[in-house]
Amino acid sequence: MVERQYVGGTCINVACIPTKSLVASARWIRDARTDSLFGVSGTQDATINLSALRAHKEGIVGAMVDAHEKMFSAPGLDFIRGEAQFIADKTVEVATEDGNSRTITADRILVNLGSRPLLPPIDGLADSGAWTSEDILRLERIPETLTIIGGGYIGVEFAQIMADFGSKVTLIADTEHIFPREDADAAAEVAAGLKDSGVQILYSVRAEKVTGHVGEAADSVSVHLSDGTQVHSAALLVATGRVPNTDQVGLEAAGIDVDDRGMIIVDQYQRTSADGVWAAGDSADTPMFTHASWHDFRVIRAQFDDEDTQFRSTTGRNIPYAVFTAVELARIGLSEKEAVESGLAVRIAKIPANAIPRAKAMRVQHGLWKAIVDEHTDKILGVNLVGPQSGEVFAVIHFGFQMPEEKSP
């Protein structure tokens, strides 16, 4: 095994785990500030202790990294820190971190390269000191004002976190609603929760130019928009997606094909165009979730163990996911928009979240529960839960999706 940067991967070090530790802190302070609604007084002026927050985050990450390093030191595993590059078919050259070089040849190779934040070619952005979704995890201060470029999952989740921490947040979305992959009604419920948290969302505008530099003043950096207006803030976060780490590793030397986005092309068994080479995770165009990468691994492991592959492939898999905002969003399967665009005739079952008695007790204002059903077969094609604790409730929905379909007698 060769690792060039993060032991344990992106999730543990600079994505899921540190982000969710911030989500947890944000939720605690958000709840504290609204406790008076439930008869609890004295917590409305709760503030963030940034050093304690960072210690909480770094302690969790450090413990998980240590556990992985211990696992990788097990007998029978040759773990190498360094940069690997294909130099021929099934042959890799590794520049180790101690300055040496090793050439490794293997009959079977698994490529799991991960991804990195995308920095779009916006004039002046590179010189502005803008943060990426990885930079903001090393937070040293809570900016008074923050502009976020990107209305997708990453941008929206950080908008919620930073608003809860006390920043005045402006979110720039170049689409008609946040979460362009989601249905407009679901996205609107999350947006309403963001608005309640003080987040300003600008729709259907593009960031065309950035001037100034991230600093202490409220107008340190300016984003010039396609409608002629400007947004000024102390800090700027770019959350416009991620790109695969497939450049500069010599994939072409091994005959491994990539698409026009740099994603490694694989089949339903995660096999690449090169015989004996498999790819998994973000760089193989797998949905960028750890549980999806784990499924990639199971598919590949079955082949390594000579199992019957008919039971292990990515064909037809449904990947559940959640966004941990104040009004959480969780989904599996098709959205209404995706089903209609696929030519399916569908029925929609939908109720507002605040119609649910438990939600009333929690003073829930925003959210919906929605199912997309095939009109002809009654098969549930997709489910979307939007509202508090949707990420937890959704486990039951996911379980249902794993059950075999009942057959009529």
Image: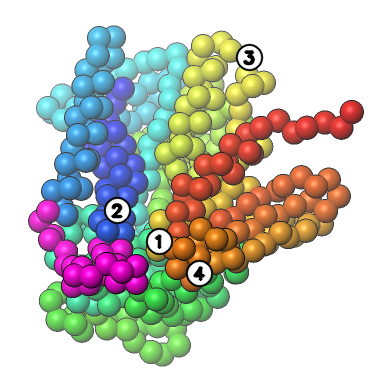
Q: Does residue 64 belong to the magenta stretch?
A: no
Q: Which residue is mark 3?
A: 308
Point out the residue furthest to the left here: 51
The residue segment tinted magenta is 29-52
Q: Nearer the viewer, residue 243 or 367?
A: 367
Whichever of callouts 2 and 1 sits on the residue coming sooner in the sequence is 2
Residue at coordinates 50% horizontally, 14% vertically from top-left? 304
Rendering coords of residue 51 (x, y %): 10, 56
Q: Tag 4, which secondary structure?
A: loop
- Residue 179 disc label: none
- The correct choice, above or below, for 55 with respect to 314 in the image is below
Task: From the image, state whether disc 4 or disc 3 is nearer to you.
Answer: 4
Number of disc labels: 4
109 in relation to 320, above or below:
above
What mark, if any, has residue 325 been given in the picture? 1
Distance between mark 4 and mark 1 Cα atoms: 12 Å
Outermost residue toward the right? 409
> At label 3, which amino acid type do we have?
Asp
> In percent of the image, x 24 and y 37: which residue is there?
5
Sequence-first tag of 4 and 2: 2
Q: CA distance from mark 4 to mark 2?
A: 20 Å
Q: Label 2 is placed on what type of residue?
A: Ala
Can you tell which mark lies on residue 24? 2
- State if disc 3 and disc 1 touch (CB < 8 Å): no
Q: Mark 1 vs mark 3: which is more N-terminal?
A: 3
Q: Give the CA separation, mark 2 to mark 1.
A: 10 Å
- Dot 1: few (<14), some (14–19), or many (≥20) neighbours within 10 Å? many
